[in-house]
Amino acid sequence: MGKLLHRVSSLFRGLSPVKYAYPALDVFLPPPVQLHLVGSIHMGTRDMMPLPAPLLQRLNRADALIVEADITGGASPFAHSETHAPLEQRLSAQNMQTLLRLCDELSINVEIIASLPGWQVALMLQAQQAQRLGLRPDYGIDYQLLQAAKQHGLKIIELEGAGEQLELLKALPDNGMPLLEDTLLHWHTNARLLQTMVSWWLETPPDRRQVALPNTFSGELNDLLMNQRNQRWSDALQRLPAGRYVVAVGALHLYGEGNLPDLLKGR
């Protein structure tokens, strides 16, 4: 009877969902669990600080903040290093020319990154791209939420943690070279996507049922970095004890096929 009442209650809430001025939605699960899912951006602009008052109010009433990883500890995957064959032996001639051009634009010493794994070079390029667009880690949504949670002594739960994320990167096919290749191929699309996600916070979030986002990952990478992680996170969130939680995950995990909200709702 309890599960039936919960399903009926969830149905009525679904007919008139609350709309927020930032990327977020509410999901209600038994026993009961209330999730305020927030589409985070890991690097943001100065205008994205402070966080919206309604979000801080939800955080103050929550039993815990749930994030992909606690990024306030200062750990960085850039500290990890392995020696590999020179990039010019691992990239096509066209991709190598693109990389050289971007390194010149971003003031990155090619010799320093030449023997790094592909995933690490990709992350370095993406971080530099975000900074050139005026984004900074301290203004990121999850970073601000973590700081506010720690200030109020709120419990913090990690869906993955920095160690698990590093292992995921290290396990990517061919030491992450497909991630580097996708980064080079979709460079300008990635920039526009970052600007679009910032606009969701500074202007208005999109309608989840209508938004169409570009695919910047190959099929295998999209499965590893999006679909499989969404499924693991959904399983973990459905095991939570009764309570109210603010859940901050990368904004793209809230949209598209196989997104986290749909998995939680059993769609």
Image (cartoon, helix red, strand yellow):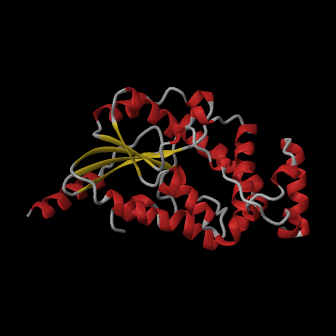
Marker count (numbered): 0
Residue nearest the viewer, comparing 84 with 233: 84
Residue nearest the viewer, comparing 140 with 1: 140
Residue 57's spot in the image, x, y percent? Answer: 34, 30
Residue at 76% across, 64% down: 181
Residue nearest the viewer, comparing 86 with 15: 86
User: If the image is split into quadrants, where does the C terminus sit?
Assistant: bottom left
The single residue placed furthest to the left in the displayed view is 1
Residue 105's spot in the image, x, y percent? Answer: 87, 44
Residue at 64% across, 34% down: 136
Residue at 87% across, 51% down: 110
User: If the image is split into quadrants, where does the N terminus sit?
Assistant: bottom left
Q: Is residue 151 left or right of residue 195?
A: left
Residue 198's spot in the image, x, y percent? Answer: 60, 40
Residue at 41% across, 59% down: 233
Q: In the picture, residue 213 is in which quadrant?
A: bottom right
Q: Is residue 3 above or below residue 136?
A: below
Q: Is residue 203 visible?
A: no
Residue 245's spot in the image, x, y percent? Answer: 32, 44
